[in-house]
Image (cartoon, rainbow, N blue to C red):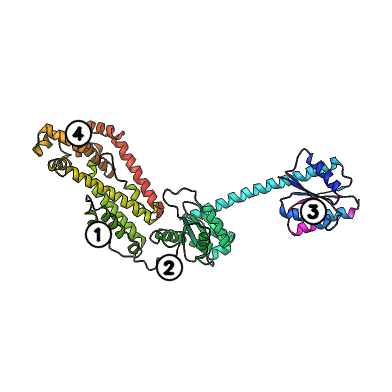
Amino acid sequence: MINILIVDDQKHIRDGLQAMVSQFPVKPDAIYVAANGAEALQLLRQYDIQLVITDIRMPEMDGLALMARTKEERIGADYLIISGYSDFAYAQKAIGLGAKGYLLKPVKRDDLQASVEHICQEIQARQELSLSMKHMTRRAQETDRKELCMFMQGAANEAEWICQTEQHHPELWRSYRLCLLREQLWINQPGASSSHSMEAIAYRVYGSKGYLTLQHGPHLILAVDASVDTGALSAALQAEQLDAVIAMTGPQQGLKELPGSYTQVMELYRHSYIFPDKRCILPVHMERLQQQWQLPYEELYALFQLIGTKNSGNIAQGISAIFHKDVLQRYHIRYTQQLIGATVQLLEEYERVIRPYMGEVALDMECLRNLFDYPSIRDYIQALQQQLLRLNQFYYDYNCSYRNTQDLNEAIRFIHESYHKPLDLAMVSNHVSLNYAYFSNIFKKNVGKGFAEYLRDVRLDKARRLLAETEHKIVDVAAMVGYESYKSFTRAFRDVMDMQPTEYRQLMRRKYEREVSCRDTAL
């Protein structure tokens, strides 16, 4: 991009120069005009102008004074001097001030075109070089940031690298805090992340030398000047109506402390879930937390005793009481995580009992395993209540449907107890002393599937658990779940799962390895 400014106190000369320049093969993006140096200086301050074509002798401020003034103000424009005086002293002074050329009036079109095109080529070459240098600087900065991020997260590095990296921001690394910012976005809330907006606010709070971005996702992590008040960033975010939680470590000294600072800031971030009303979580908020506790098993068991009743309101209130913030805020975040684990385990045990009667419907246990997948503890508790109330409804419907069918309940219990033995419909109907045809009819009507299909599903459910959780040979698994031949077992497994037992076992192992890897990464 080339913008040109023409400066001359005579209007007909300004107009003539403007007409000539506008007809050159390489046209500038914009042409500005000024009657003297003072007007020209205002335009140079206001617009991005690369080339000034100016007369030397003008009232108020001549061309030489204009050059000197822009040099003082560090306005980066090139100059082409035009004068009616063939005085070498003027040319010498103009060149000393950085003029790229000197033309005598009356200016010839060819001489002007040659000078302008030559200077424009120089300007374009500088612009391309500057752009290239900016790209190189950006890439180098991004590489440095990635190396810092890896080091922060535990990657080893040499002492020489640590020393060299500290020199890039010596004042910051001398005394800094690690700061994690998590924007408060609610479930199903539209909109993109405001990490760049938060960076801009951090720039205003700490200045260009007072902060450094180490990580953009999944959370924004900054190293910030420890001398700045810890509440300044939170106040600035609130002023901009950005709802974000901040976790901020105590003052740190030296880059060697960065990995430990990262561990501390992640621990603070996890504790932000039990302090939903605090916008900035500091180490002082963790100092009073108890490190020993006893989980409220009696309250949990009493809560689950309500499953299958009409007391859905009491169930929701019970979960809210067990996960009340006044309780959670007494203990380290591990208490909340262990409480979640115990609750989900009970949910699984209760679901396992009723699963054969649920058909295609199932509870979503996976969504409850990790608190930190949710925007806040409130969202997690709502999801937990939802799954618990669904389980309650399943049990209630089951109890209503089977209240007067004790024989069928006994038959189902007998199937689950004897699935690994040779078993058929006649054996089960004899066990509950019911007519073969009558039993077959009520079984399908109430369970929703025929006896053979139900027995197959029970056996395959047990087989899947054995394949996923044990090292038993597949032929042994087949026998353990009641199949007399390996061939009939694999055929049934393939019909239901659309894969061989060996493929299923490999799939479960890969899933387990990914879960272990994800947990290790989260820690």
Query: Disc 1 to disc 4, how far (Cα)?
Result: 40 Å
Please give the label number shown on residue 352.
Answer: none
Badges 4 and 3: C-beta atoms under 8 Å apart? no
Disc 1 or disc 3, which is closer to the eye?
A: 1
Q: Which residues are magenta?
A: 67-88
Label 4 is placed on what type of residue? Answer: Gly
- Read off the residue under disc 4: 450
- Read off the residue under disc 2: 284
Query: Disc 2 to disc 3, how far (Cα)?
Result: 60 Å
- Read off the residue under disc 3: 98
Residue 16: quarter of image: top right
Q: Earlier in the sequence, mark 1 or mark 4?
A: 1
Residue 333 part of the magenta segment: no
Q: Earlier in the sequence, mark 4 or mark 3?
A: 3
Give the crowd class for mark 1: few <14, some 14-19, many >=20 residues within 10 Å. some
Disc 2 or disc 3, which is closer to the eye?
A: 2
What percent of the width, then of the height, locates residue 420? 17, 39
Seen in the picture, residue 287 relative to 466 is either above or below; the reply is: below
Camera sees residue 407: yes
Give the crowd class for mark 3: few <14, some 14-19, many >=20 residues within 10 Å. some
The secondary structure type at the circle numbered 2 is: helix
Query: Disc 1 to disc 2, how far (Cα)?
Result: 31 Å
Label 3 is placed on what type of residue? Answer: Gly
Q: Quadrant of the C terminus?
A: bottom left
Label 2 is placed on what type of residue? Answer: Val
